[in-house]
Image (cartoon, rainbow, N blue to C red):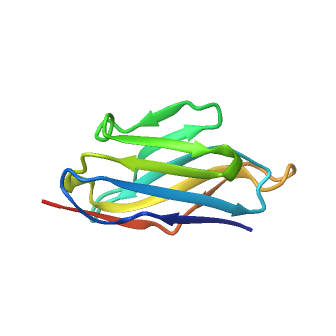
Amino acid sequence: QVQLVESGGGLVQAGGSLRLSCAASGSIFVVNAMSWYRQAPGKQRELVAAIITGGSTNYADSVKGRFTISRDNAKNTAYLQMNSLKPEDTAVYYCNARLKATILRPWNDYWGQGTQVTVSS
């Protein structure tokens, strides 16, 4: 089985910073991409940032210039550095990994449990 473990969420004041971590473990043959999503109360889950093995990244317009996604391919770990946090960033943040558990398995998406980020005014 594949397990994604997240950490780094918490309560922070507006303008502050947090760094989220997501470590994938278990049966992993190769990881194609890792990404971060978030879901605020009453809203749909949205893509925040994504990164592929080659290093290409993609960001939501609302976080561009403030958030940075990175990845340690050897450790199958993704990070999300969040700076200049705003109250509207408050949400549950979820890590996603697209990977092959074995060479014979198809590509599949795996999710972390989610971590709460709360930004106060």
In the image as oriented, which residue stretches furthest toward the right?
Answer: 104
The percent position of residue 50, horizontal first and vertical second, equals 50, 41
* Residue nearest the observer in this picture, 71 or 59: 71
The percent position of residue 87, horizontal first and vertical second, equals 19, 56
Q: How many marks?
A: 0
Relative to 55, does residue 84 appear above or below in the rendering? Answer: below
Relative to 94, does residue 86 appear above or below in the rendering? Answer: above
Residue 20: quadrant of the picture: bottom left
Q: Residue at x 50, y 57 (%)?
A: 21
Q: Residue at x 28, y 40 (%)?
A: 62
The percent position of residue 96, horizontal first and vertical second, equals 55, 54
Q: Residue at x 76, y 56 (%)?
A: 28
Please state, as top left, top right, bottom left or bottom right, where the C terminus lies in the image: bottom left
Q: Residue at x 41, y 59 (%)?
A: 93
The percent position of residue 29, horizontal first and vertical second, equals 80, 51
In the figure, is residue 28 to the left or right of 89? right
In the image as oriented, which residue stretches furthest toward the left?
Answer: 121
In the figure, is residue 26 to the left or right of 86? right
Please state, as top left, top right, bottom left or bottom right, where the N terminus lies in the image: bottom right
